[in-house]
Amino acid sequence: MKLVKLMYLLDRLAIKHLGMPVAGGRYFSMRNGPVTSEVLDLVNSGSLACDSTDLWEQFITDRDQHLVGLKSHEAPRDELSDAEMTLIQELWDEHGGKDQWELRDWCHENCEEWSPLENGRLNISLSEIASAVGLSPRVAEELETDAKEHRFIGSLLRRS
């Protein structure tokens, strides 16, 4: 759960500072707080239904008793910009010492886009996240439009 929360919070922080998420994906409110669906799927099963996960399998251990770990500390960072690395460090400095339950509680108290649920899930749009971190409604709408276009183009490329 800690990794799932940290990845969600990284995207949230990146939306605030960079105007786009680092990992991206579909966001949901769930009982234990907000999640990025694809990250949760990777942690739970080690793969995504719609995508290759070679890098995940190469660097992340299989889940064992609700835990995953690094197979190697030499993971490439060629997909991450210096700005994203700075955000990762900032996030770790603030939240790295928290356990999964402290992170869950922090998200419950500080992520206004999250809706409390007993069961199931409820979609969180990018525009809701953007608004919650203080971006203007216009910027939030543009972010949502860009994400929809990106998903559409990605679906076309997967078909070819």
Image (cartoon, rainbow, N blue to C red):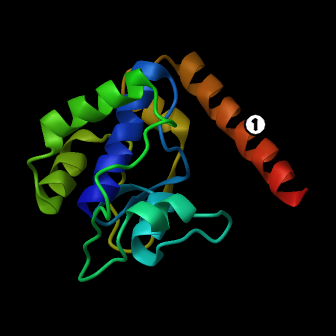
Badge 1 amino acid: Glu
> In what quadrant of the picture does the C terminus appear?
bottom right
Q: Position of residue 53 (x, y in %)?
A: 57, 64
Give how far across and how far down residue 21 sits, in percent: 49, 35
| Residue 117 or residue 69, whichever sits in front | 69
Q: Residue furthest left?
A: 97
Q: Is residue 71 left or right of residue 26?
A: left
Residue neighbourhood size for the residue with mark 1, other residues' Cα within 10 Å, grouped as few (<14), some (14–19), many (≥20): few
Q: Nearer the viewer, residue 42 or 29?
A: 42
Q: Residue 84 is drawn in which quadrant?
A: top left
Res 131 visible: no
Q: Which residue is mark 1?
A: 149
Q: Nearer the viewer, residue 58 or 116?
A: 58
In which quadrant will I find the N terminus? bottom left
Residue 28 appears at what percent x and percent y?
46, 56
Number of labelled discs?
A: 1
Q: Nearer the viewer, residue 69 or 45?
A: 69
The structure residue drawn at horizontal position 40% and vertical position 56%, both measured from the top left corner, is 35
Q: Is residue 130 left or right of residue 140?
A: left
